[in-house]
Amino acid sequence: MKTLGNLLWLIFGGLATALEYFISSLLMMITIIGIPFGVQSMKMASLCLWPFGADVRKKETPPASGCLNTAMNILWFLLGGIWISLTHLFFGILLSITIIGIPFGKQHFKLAGIALTPFGREVVR
């Protein structure tokens, strides 16, 4: 069932969303400062390609890196994370109107959460 959901997800917009994340990550990786943001965008691109069967959870990190994750999440939030998250939230609400679209809406809500604060999280398959 997960495979069917993932294939339908790719056909109905998942591939386009993943390509957008992938292109933005390559553009962010042009500068040294943008590499961590590009890596997080690449993580979201991989999640957009195959979201069914994947879970996002907080990464076990030492306390010293937690401060860095918080600072990077604040910077990400201010530079565009809020807009990406609102877009996923909008599509999640739109897709949840119909019964058939509810699983796809749930995936958009999962993507909205990781798009809001991607640092300090990991994707588990």
Image (cartoon, helix red, strand yellow):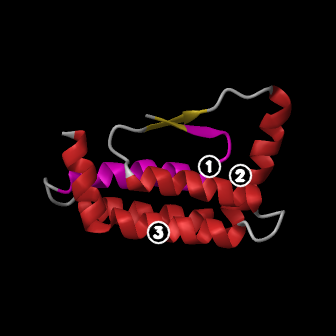
Discs 1, 2 touching: Cβ within 8 Å: yes
Of mark 3 and mark 1, the one earlier in the sequence is 3
What amino acid does circle 2 point to?
Asn
Identify which residue is drawn at 20% across, 60% down: 97
Q: Which residue is mark 3?
A: 19
Q: Which residue is mark 2?
A: 73
- Residue 116 among magenta residues: yes
Q: Position of residue 19 (x, y in %)?
A: 47, 68
What amino acid does circle 3 point to?
Leu
Q: Give the class, few, some or many, for how many residues have Cα within 10 Å of label 1's Cα (few <14, many ≥20).
A: many
Q: CA distance from mark 2 to mark 3?
A: 22 Å
Q: Secondary structure at mark 2?
A: helix
- Residue 70 among magenta residues: no
* 13 lies above or below 63: below
Q: Position of residue 14 (x, y in %)?
A: 35, 62
* 20 lies above or below 69: below
